[in-house]
Image (cartoon, helix red, strand yellow):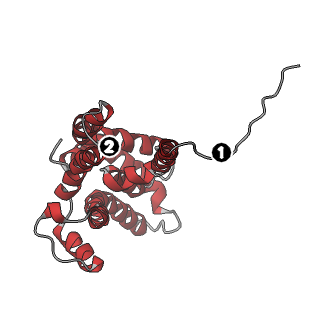
Amino acid sequence: MIPIPLLQLSLTPAENPQDVAISLQIIALMTVLSLAPAILLMLTSFTRIIVVLGFVQRSIGLQQTPPQQVTIGLALFLTLFIMYPTWNQIYERGLAPYMAGNVSAEQAWTETITPVRNFMSRYTRQDELSLMISMSGIEQPENSDAVPTRVLIPAFMLSELKTAFQMGVVIYIPFIVVDMVVASVLLAMGMMMLPPIMISLPFKILLFVMADGWNLVVVSLLKSFVNV
């Protein structure tokens, strides 16, 4: 008979302060890993991309095509493509020197957060930034470097949502025109009982394919980030 291993979880007193520090580092690492999806949403281009792709699906009228996993996968890989210069700076300036023991943890954190802050500052609208500064109750910063990170992050997310919705409206317009034309034709023919979506859906898909819609959407998303 194969023996079943016994798993035990226990707490033992630390023999020296170094053991406590290692335990705290492990807890901090696990916390960061659990927050990684939220960090990806907050600090990168993922928010704008996934919202715009969602607008594409709903404007055409396709709720399940492409599947949600495909849409999220495309958004993730586009995010990797857009964020590569920023993440490369993070590794070269912060992580690599820290792992080599050339800089302290404080210096590594500063060199790691600086490229991320520069990326967020580049795409944060002044109106949203002013709103968050006024709501936080702090004094007006002299420049973008003086803006606290806790203020910059929500301002960046609001800016990304605003930009994504503006792009979504532009995507919606041609498909709304198709819906209006089809509905008018059916009404003129007296076919009021026939749902317009049944007729307009193939035409919207055909329009999207003939216009090379995916290429236009992806190129527009990439060009909206000038550092690409």
Q: Residue 99 in the image: x percent, y percent?
A: 33, 33
Name which residue type carries label 1. Thr
Report the side of 167 relative to 47 (left or right): left
Residue under label 1, please give it.
12
Is 86 displayed left or right of 16 in the figure? left
- Residue displayed at 47% across by 49% down: 28
Q: What SS does tag 1 mark?
A: loop
**Does 201 sit left or right of 217 as displayed?**
right
Assign the N terminus to one quadrant of the image: top right
> Residue at label 2?
79
Give the camera-side residue of 115 and 182: 115
Q: Is label 2 in a helix, a strand or a loop?
A: helix
**Residue lying furthest right in this view?**
1
**Residue visible at 17% across and 55% down?**
122
- The answer to whether marks 1 and 2 mark residues whose Cβ atoms lie closer than 8 Å is no
Whether residue 174 sits left or right of residue 203 in the image: it is: left
Q: Amino acid at mark 2?
A: Thr
Q: Percent from the top left, x then y, of residue 44?
A: 31, 50
174, above or below 192, in the image: above
Query: Is residue 65 visible in this depiction of the protein?
Result: no
Q: Along the polypeptide, which appears first: circle 1 or circle 2?
A: 1
Dot 2: few (<14), some (14–19), or many (≥20) neighbours within 10 Å? many
Mark 1 or mark 2, which is nearer to you? 1
Residue reaching furthest to the top: 1
The spot of residue 181 in percent (x, y) is 33, 62
